[in-house]
Amino acid sequence: MHVNYYHFGLFVGLFVGCLVAGLLLRFVKTEGSWRCRFDERQELHRGRGYKYGFYTLLCYIVVDYVVINVFEKQWAAEGVDILIGVIVSVGVYAIYCIFHEAFLSLNENPKRYVAVIIFCMLLNGLGAVMQFQHNPVIENGQLTTHCMNLVSAVLMAVVLIALALKYGISQKED
């Protein structure tokens, strides 16, 4: 029997990641519920945020397709280009929701949520540094999968900046 250690490690990593994500979600909630509570206005803006994120992903995929197939320029390894598109669209969704006060639910602690984002950003930043020390980020003129920690850390930083800007704007309005 041949054991594929890569797939086993991937499975264990996904399992541990889901477990940690669950614990972090539990950490940011102010009530005993796992579910997020949003009011009607927040739900409306979250729906619009999803729409803008979806359209962003569609446009990204079209541009990616044109670059790869029309200009015949493979700029990223297989799948990396799509993952970057997903992260960009999640960023659009998050920023829209932040500036329309629909990012955090009514039962989430903002300070804890920011702490979790900082933790995730630092963890991904550390992962990026480790990847850069041992693996090439660009190989044969293409981004490799080793850039994904950096891309994730940048997303977290952008979300933190948006939260800080929105907090500053809200403080001036009050």
Image (spheres, helix red, strand yellow):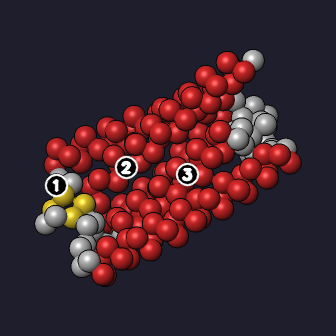
Tell me: residue 16, above or below residue 79. above
Q: Is residue 82 visible?
A: yes
Q: Looking at the figure, which quarter contains the C terminus?
A: top right
68 sits to left or right of 40:
left
Measured as percent of width and height from the top left, residue 121 is found at: 43, 37
Between marks 3 and 2 in the image, the one whose residue lies nearer the viewer: 3
Say which label, 1 or 2, has the lower sequence index: 1
Question: Could you tell me residue 105's position as x and y percent?
Answer: 74, 40
Task: Residue type at mark 1: give it.
Answer: Pro
Residue found at the very far left of the displayed protein: 140
* Residue 18 in view of the camera: no
Looking at the image, tell me whether mark 3 or mark 2 is earlier in sequence order.
3
Rendered location of residue 92, percent (x, y) = 55, 51
Residue position marked by numbered label 2 in the rendering: 151
Count every numbered label the image shows and give the total. 3
Image quarter of residue 5: bottom left
Quadrant in which the N terminus appears: bottom left
Q: Which residue is mark 1?
A: 136
Dot 1 alpha-carbon crowd within 10 angstroms: few under 14, some 14 to 19, many 20 or more: some
